[in-house]
Image: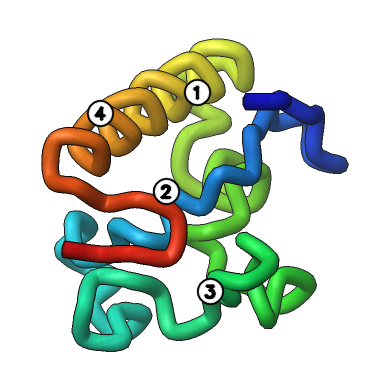
Amino acid sequence: MEIFLREDGFPCAACGVCCRRVHTVNFEHTLNRGDGVCINFVEETNKCSIYAQRPEFCNIAAYYDRHYAEVMSWSAFVQLNLQVCEMLKKQAMENGVDKGTHR
């Protein structure tokens, strides 16, 4: 899977796993369309339909600036997020979640 550097400096594979697993985040239940997938996720393109106006939680740089900038470096924050990303990918594979499918 190809990794690209987003405009905020976050390395992302654009795999959509985080968007297919919003049910795992307790405080973002309003984004869950009922099957664990974000209501703004477009499965055909693996992209967010409201990317430019996405919630702060989905905006890694904005979330970092508001909640973590004073307690850890950007690099440490990115590493933590990449660990969560890998965990979500592993869970998705274990649970049979594949592109466009949530079981």
**Position above or below: 22 against 89:** below
Residue tagged 1 = 77
Mark pair 3, 2: CA separation: 10 Å
Up the image or down, 20 lies above or below 79; here it is below
**Cα distance in 3D space between marks 3 and 4:** 20 Å
Residue 32 occupies quadrant: bottom left
Q: Which residue: 53% across, 74% down?
A: 41
| Cα gap from disc 2 to disc 1, whole angstroms | 19 Å
Amino acid of disc 1: Phe
Question: Which badge, 2 or 1, comes first in the chain's sequence?
Answer: 2
Label pair 3/4, CB-CB below 8 angstroms: no
Residue at 68 percent across and 80 percent down: it is 50
Q: Mark 4 points at which residue?
A: 90
**Helix, strand or loop for disc 4:** helix
Q: Which amino acid does label 2 sit on?
A: Val
Badge 3 density bin: few <14, some 14–19, many ≥20, Cα 10 Å? some
Query: Which label's residue is closer to the chain start, 1 or 3?
Result: 3
Sequence-first tag of 4 and 2: 2
Q: Is mark 1 on a helix, strand or loop?
A: helix
Which secondary structure, mark 2? loop
User: Where does residue 57 sit, x and y in percent of width and height?
Assistant: 47, 59
Which residue is under mark 3?
41
Q: How far apart are marks 4 and 2 (CA)?
A: 10 Å
Q: Where is residue 2 in the image (x, y as percent from the top left)?
A: 71, 25
Q: Which residue is drawn at 69% across and 66% down?
A: 45
In the displayed structure, does residue 53 sit left or right of residue 42? right
Q: Name the residue under label 2.
A: 17
Q: Specify the quadrant of the image occupied by residue 12.
A: top right
Contact between labelled residues 2 and 4, with CB atoms less than 8 Å apart? no
Whether pointer 1 and pointer 3 mark residues with C-beta atoms closer than 8 Å, the reply is no
Of tags 4 and 1, the one toward the viewer is 4
